[in-house]
Image (cartoon, grey):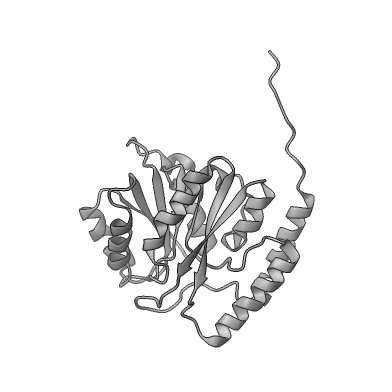
Amino acid sequence: MSDQLANSGQPAPDVSIVVPVRNEQDNVAPLIAEIAAALDGRWAYEIIYVNDGSTDATGERLAAEMRARNNLRQIRHAASSGQSAAVRTGIRAARGRIVATLDGDGQNNPAFLPALIEAIEKGGEKVGLAAGQRVGRKDTGFKKFQSRTANSVRNAILHDGTRDTGCGLKALRRDVFLALPYFDGLHRFLPALVRREGYDIVYVDVIDRPRHSGVSNYGFFDRLWIGIMDLAGVWWLIRRKKSTPVATEVN
């Protein structure tokens, strides 16, 4: 997909909200209503749902919502490509300078979006990412143990200063994201990669909640064995990073 999707001929919004979804038909309408309640009257914004090859009525539910909301867009993957690919598709299509992301299952509360967006605005050119850090997680004890273990190992190797990379609630500058190297699983390593580019990160505590309905459709980096190769790759990228030369054009 090319960046041409980001050019619709309409005035660019201030903020783009990107929501990756796969088979979340019953969560579509409630989450969109919550996003609107959090942002209406505060920013000019668009909502981009990336329908990652859903086989249920997710596409139809989005189409119905689009008839009532002119700031809602749907981009569909022909086949499921995973959460990182869906996030990337949405951010490439975004027209806002600031992009915020959240999961489509309802566990991420849109009420925290304003704090994340404001953190980017106030940070200026120095801050590249505002990351949600979950408190009161609504997961099983075993899944929490897996997550704590994975986060501890990741932080020990990458020194990214982040205790929770799995939270879908994030806000970042679109240009910063597009400058990052892309690979499957990228969204789990955003803090380390944003720091690699020389930007600061702001952390915002967010309250986790149970999903509205349905079951999880994406795998978790919590399963440490799935992310070992990605972790090694990101460590290599950080080690190989060189400072950007100061360049001036000579007339």
Looking at this rendering, what residue extends furthest in the left direction? 68
Question: What residue is rendered at 46% in x and 74% in y?
Answer: 217
- Quadrant of the frame with the C terminus: top right
Using the rendered image of the protein, determine whether residue 76 is visible from the camera's viewpoint: no
Q: Could you tell me which residue is drawn at 32 percent across and 53 percent down?
A: 39
Vertical relation: 54 (above or below) 242: below
Q: Report whether 13 appears left or right of 134.
A: left
Compared with 101, 127 (above or below) is above
The image quarter containing residue 159 is bottom right
* Residue 211 point in image, percent of width and height: 39, 76
Location of residue 153 in the rendering, given as x and y in whole percent from the top left corner: 71, 72
Q: At 75% from the left edge and 41% from the top edge, which residue is drawn?
A: 243
Tell me if I can see residue 246 in this picture: yes
| Residue drawn 31% across the image and 63% down it | 34
Q: Quadrant of residue 77?
A: bottom left
Question: Would you place residue 32 above or below residue 241 in this image?
Answer: below
